[in-house]
């Protein structure tokens, strides 16, 4: 696809613990599929989808990636400026819920994040998640808030988000 085929190109990186459904979300959005029995993603699972938003063609590249701890720095792809959104997946498994919705919403608000609950299995809010994020990124691009500069942090120097206070089971 050449530059003439889209107006905006955004890289969307999903970050979270293993088994939370990052790859299933991306597959549901990019391919319209839910892979039952999806195993752990090893390495990089890179997927692309082009959508039209308000007459603008947006090419979104999506990459799920796993963090190994409850407090870990975002990778250097999360260099400032960045749009960070908290998302709760697997709402179809209400009986296994580990974090109360209000607690997740309060945490997202305290971190100045948007919050949305989804289900990749049932396709609930998946399209909305990615399209809302693309709309936010378009707005930031139009306001020249997104730029490629040489002051991006080196790997391991990204923003640290502690979410133990949100996600403790006790």
Image (cartoon, helix red, strand yellow):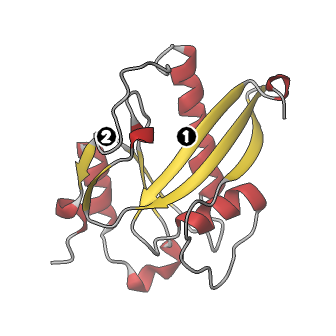
Residue that appears at 50% across and 73% down? 90
Q: Residue 94: image x %, image y %?
A: 44, 80
Most foreground residue, 154 or 139: 154
The reply, left or right, for residue 32 in relation to residue 20 is right
* Rendered-image quadrant of the C terminus: bottom left
The dot on residue 133 is 1
Q: Is residue 75 above or below residue 34?
A: above
Q: Position of residue 21 (x, y in %)?
A: 52, 70
Q: Is residue 37 left or right of residue 147?
A: right
Residue depicted at x 49% and y 22%? 146
Q: Residues within 10 Å of mark 1 (few under 14, many from 20)?
A: some
Q: Is residue 79 above or below residue 61?
A: above
Q: Which mark is residue 123?
A: none
Report which quarter residue 1 is drawn in: top right
Which residue occupies 39% across, 33% down?
79
- Give 71 or 135, whichever is nearer the viewer: 71
Front disc: 2 or 1? 2
Q: Is residue 144 left or right of residue 69?
A: right
User: Callout 2 environment at 10 Å: few (<14), some (14 to 19), or many (20+)?
Assistant: some
**Which quarter of the picture shows residue 135?**
top right
Which residue is under mark 2?
158
Q: Position of residue 151 (x, y in %)?
A: 36, 21
Position of residue 112 relative to residue 169, above or below, is above
């Amino acid at each position: 696809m050449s530059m003439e085929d889209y107006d905006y190109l955004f890289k969307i990186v999903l970050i979270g613990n293993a088994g939370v459904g990052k790859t299933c979300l991306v597959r549901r959005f990019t391919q319209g599929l839910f892979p039952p029995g999806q195993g752990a993603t090893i390495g990089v699972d890179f997927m692309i989808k082009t959508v039209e938003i308000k007459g603008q063609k947006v090419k979104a590249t999506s990459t799920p990636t796993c963090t190994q701890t409850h407090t870990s720095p975002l990778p250097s792809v999360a260099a400032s400026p960045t749009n960070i959104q908290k998302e709760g997946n697997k709402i179809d498994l209400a009986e296994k819920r580990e974090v109360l919705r209000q607690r997740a919403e309060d945490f997202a608000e305290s971190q100045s994040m948007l919050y949305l609950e989804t289900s990749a299995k049932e396709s609930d809010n998946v399209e909305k998640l990615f399209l809302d994020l693309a709309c936010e990124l378009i707005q930031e691009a139009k306001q020249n808030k997104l730029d490629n500069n040489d002051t991006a942090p080196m790997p391991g120097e990204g923003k640290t988000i502690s979410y133990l206070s949100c996600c403790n089971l006790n």
